[in-house]
């Protein structure tokens, strides 16, 4: 079997199609454990050489990859330089164009033009977005119209493993709430404020923040200290990072409501993890989140469409939370938290439907069927 463009490579009698991932982040590791039946996944490291001109905040951006041991390279998050056949999997088109030249900003048109050049090459086979919202950024951000590269573009939702039934609980009396991730960008300040307000009515509730002080990312030291003090002084709030094994084996099975009122989000894989455990989710209707959470069916979504979150929180950094936006998110979050606390039946209903969606729309069986077709097309 050969991996260079122009040499015919197939699975079948010769063995499974050998696909290399370029990133070892959580989602890729999850996918690697559940490959399609005729596919083998492994991870590939970049070559030592570096592009000294192009710089990016994304680790390994435009890394060089070559392999005679793989039939196809699946680049994740960052585009790559390679002579192998390759496909590219991203949340939105902004990620693909996050680079500069020797530290100097480049016009968006120049960055988009370079990406289109890479993707017009014969060895580039498919651009895969993780959501329909992500695909729309090809036009809204990249200015690439319908019909251009159309045969090279697809939407394939990420997959989440099915959780054993014994780790799932519905409608318990003791209500535990969970938040995880970048504290300010994902709405942790609103979570703490809404929790403290709900705590006055329901003193038995508990909140776990799966983050630590490093996740309180902001250049506003007063804002950071304000919320660190709130968290430290509340005995019902537990804060700190935990190993993934503890998260999926202990914390998620004991969680009744997952909170992620995020301000900006490329996809939101943590939401899928909660849904897989039959946990109702309270989030915002930003970007691709409504493609996962159906308001009033699998969870509740705070409507932030009246605010330009991309403008308010540029660069994924929160240095200030405007008062009107802050009140809007906190008040709606508080209302939804109370609604779910007061009704174990509603938590049960939402949780079961969320689990069903995770096991169907975001199952490995669904994803693998789509990826098998993409791999077959890529290999000709």
Image (cartoon, rainbow, N blue to C red):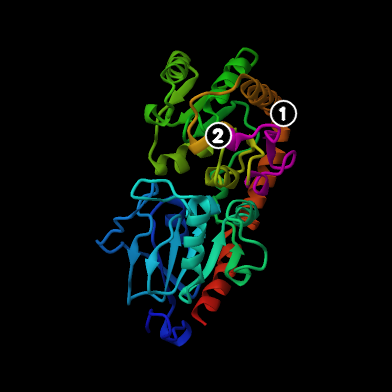
Cα distance, mark 2 to mark 1?
A: 15 Å
Residue 223 x, y percent position in the rendering: 47, 19
What residue did someone put label 2 on?
255
Local packing at callout 1 (Cα closer than 10 Å; few below 14, some 14-19, many 20+) is few
The N terminus sits in image quarter: bottom left
**What residue is shown at x 60% (from left), y 65% (from top)?**
154
Residue 173 x, y percent position in the rendering: 63, 27
Local packing at callout 2 (Cα closer than 10 Å; few below 14, some 14-19, many 20+) is many
Query: Is there a contact, CB below 8 Å, between mark 2 and mark 1?
Result: no
Residue 123 x, y percent position in the rendering: 45, 75
Q: Quadrant of residue 3?
A: bottom left
Q: How many marks?
A: 2
- Is 345 included in the stretch rendered in magenta? no
Q: Is residue 169 left or right of residue 21?
A: right
**Disc ID at residue 195:** none
Q: Secondary structure at mark 2?
A: loop
Magenta segment, which residues? 288-311
Q: Is residue 225 visible?
A: yes
**What residue is shown at x 45% (from left), y 55% (from top)?**
77
Q: Secondary structure at mark 1?
A: loop
Q: Is residue 266 above or below residue 259?
A: below
Q: Quadrant of residue 24?
A: bottom left
- Give the camera-side residue of 333 and 207: 333
- Is 295 included in the stretch rendered in magenta? yes
Pointer 2 or 1: first along the chain? 2
**What residue is shown at x 32% (from left), y 55% (from top)?**
53
What residue did someone put label 1 on?
343
Q: Quadrant of residue 368?
A: bottom right
Q: Is residue 106 above or below residue 34?
A: above
């Amino acid at each position: 079997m050969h991996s260079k463009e122009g040499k015919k490579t197939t699975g079948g009698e010769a063995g499974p199609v050998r696909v290399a991932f370029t990133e070892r982040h959580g989602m890729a590791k999850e996918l690697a454990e559940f490959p399609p039946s005729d596919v083998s996944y492994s991870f590939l490291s970049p070559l030592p050489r570096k592009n000294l001109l192009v710089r990016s905040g994304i680790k390994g951006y435009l890394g060089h990859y070559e392999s005679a041991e793989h039939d196809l390279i699946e680049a994740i998050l960052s585009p790559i330089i390679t002579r192998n056949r390759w496909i590219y999997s991203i949340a939105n088109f902004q990620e693909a164009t996050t680079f500069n030249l020797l530290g100097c900003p480049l016009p968006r048109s120049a960055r988009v033009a370079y990406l289109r050049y890479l993707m017009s090459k014969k060895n580039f086979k498919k651009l895969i977005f993780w959501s329909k919202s992500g695909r729309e950024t090809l036009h809204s951000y990249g200015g690439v119209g319908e019909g251009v590269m159309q045969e090279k573009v697809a939407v394939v939702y990420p997959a989440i493993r099915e959780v054993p039934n014994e780790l799932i609980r519905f409608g318990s009396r003791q209500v535990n709430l969970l938040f995880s991730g970048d504290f300010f960008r994902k709405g942790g300040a609103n979570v703490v404020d809404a929790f403290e307000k709900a705590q006055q009515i329901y003193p038995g509730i508990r909140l776990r923040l799966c983050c630590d002080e490093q996740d309180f990312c902001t250049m506003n030291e007063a804002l950071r200290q304000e919320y660190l003090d709130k968290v430290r002084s509340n005995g019902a709030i537990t804060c700190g990072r935990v190993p993934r094994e503890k998260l999926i084996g202990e914390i998620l099975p004991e969680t009744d409501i997952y909170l992620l009122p995020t301000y900006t989000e490329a996809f939101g894989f943590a939401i899928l993890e909660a849904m897989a455990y039959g946990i109702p989710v309270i989030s915002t209707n930003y970007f691709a989140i409504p493609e996962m959470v159906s308001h009033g069916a699998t969870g509740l979504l705070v409507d932030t469409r009246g605010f330009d979150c991309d403008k308010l929180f540029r660069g994924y950094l929160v240095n200030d939370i405007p008062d009107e936006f802050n009140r809007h998110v906190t008040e709606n979050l508080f209302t939804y938290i109370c609604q779910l606390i007061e009704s174990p039946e509603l938590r049960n209903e939402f949780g079961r439907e969320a689990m069903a969606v995770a096991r169907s729309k975001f199952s490995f069986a669904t994803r693998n069927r789509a990826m098998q077709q993409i791999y077959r097309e890529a290999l000709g």
